[in-house]
Image (tube, grey):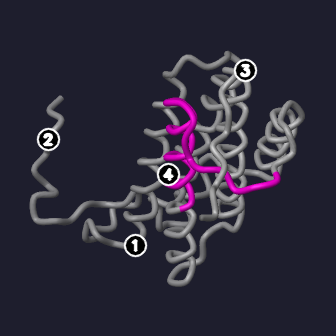
């Protein structure tokens, strides 16, 4: 099977339903940004982090694929058969945030997105997550988006922030506090 089809050479592509759209379509921007986020999450997964965090990141990657496949579909009948995100998925992220946060000192200042290479990768993923959230909100202004997708990304960015702090803590590194000078 050839990887290249040449069908998109005119700047168009097809959604899961077969609908032809331009590659700069807001729907493609939304699921493309989710795909980009998933790649950054994969990069985090590939770092030297503990197995518990790897397990969580693996679950998140699959859930991002679930969101992306739903966003890539504009046919309600096809969409019915796609995997969904549930409130339980969001609760699972919240539980993981709480688990990690238990070990961390109280946050009394803004921190800079740095500290070590893995922590910095968490912050990059967090900012891409925020962008993915914004693109879903933009899409939602044009076409109805499942509100759980937006909620999931909002919680995921919180998780990535806490994960960055936890990785610093676990490695004995210090957070770099914002200096208001």
Q: Give the residue number, with chain letter if any, for mark 3.
A: 52
Mark earlier in primary sequence (1, 4): 1
Q: Nearer the viewer, mark 1 or mark 4?
A: 1
> In x, y percent, where is residue 77?
56, 62
Residue 4 numbered tag: 2
On-image quarter of the N terminus: top left
Q: Are marks 1 and 4 in contact (CB under 8 Å)?
A: no
| Relative vertical location of residue 135 with respect to residue 152 in this rendering, above or below | below
Mark earlier in primary sequence (1, 2): 2
| Relative vertical location of residue 176 with respect to residue 71 in this rendering, above or below | above
Magenta extent: 108-130
Residue 50 covered by magenta stretch: no
Q: Give the residue number, with chain letter if any, for mark 1.
A: 26
x 40%, y 60%: residue: 17
The CA span between labels 1 and 4 is 15 Å
The CA span between labels 1 and 2 is 23 Å
Q: Secondary structure at mark 4?
A: helix
Mark earlier in primary sequence (3, 4): 3
Q: Give the residue number, with chain letter if any, for mark 4.
A: 69
x 46%, y 31%: residue: 43
| Relative vertical location of residue 120 with respect to residue 108 in this rendering, above or below | above
């Amino acid at each position: 099977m050839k990887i290249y089809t040449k069908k998109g050479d005119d700047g168009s592509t097809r959604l899961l339903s077969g609908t032809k759209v331009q590659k700069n379509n807001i729907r493609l921007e939304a699921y493309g940004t989710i795909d980009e986020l998933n790649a950054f999450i994969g990069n985090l997964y590939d770092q030297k982090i503990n197995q518990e965090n790897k397990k969580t990141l693996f679950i998140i990657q699959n859930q991002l694929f679930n969101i992306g496949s739903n966003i890539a579909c504009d046919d309600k009948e096809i969409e019915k058969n796609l995997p969904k995100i549930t409130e339980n998925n969001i609760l699972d992220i919240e539980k993981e945030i709480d688990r990690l946060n238990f070990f961390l000192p109280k946050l009394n200042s803004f921190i800079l997105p740095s500290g070590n290479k893995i922590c910095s990768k968490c912050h990059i993923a967090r900012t891409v997550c925020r962008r993915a959230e914004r693109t879903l909100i933009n899409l939602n202004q044009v076409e109805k988006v499942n509100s759980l997708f937006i909620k999931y990304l909002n919680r995921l960015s919180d998780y990535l922030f806490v994960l960055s702090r936890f990785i610093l803590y676990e490695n004995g590194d210090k957070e770099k506090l914002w200096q208001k000078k």
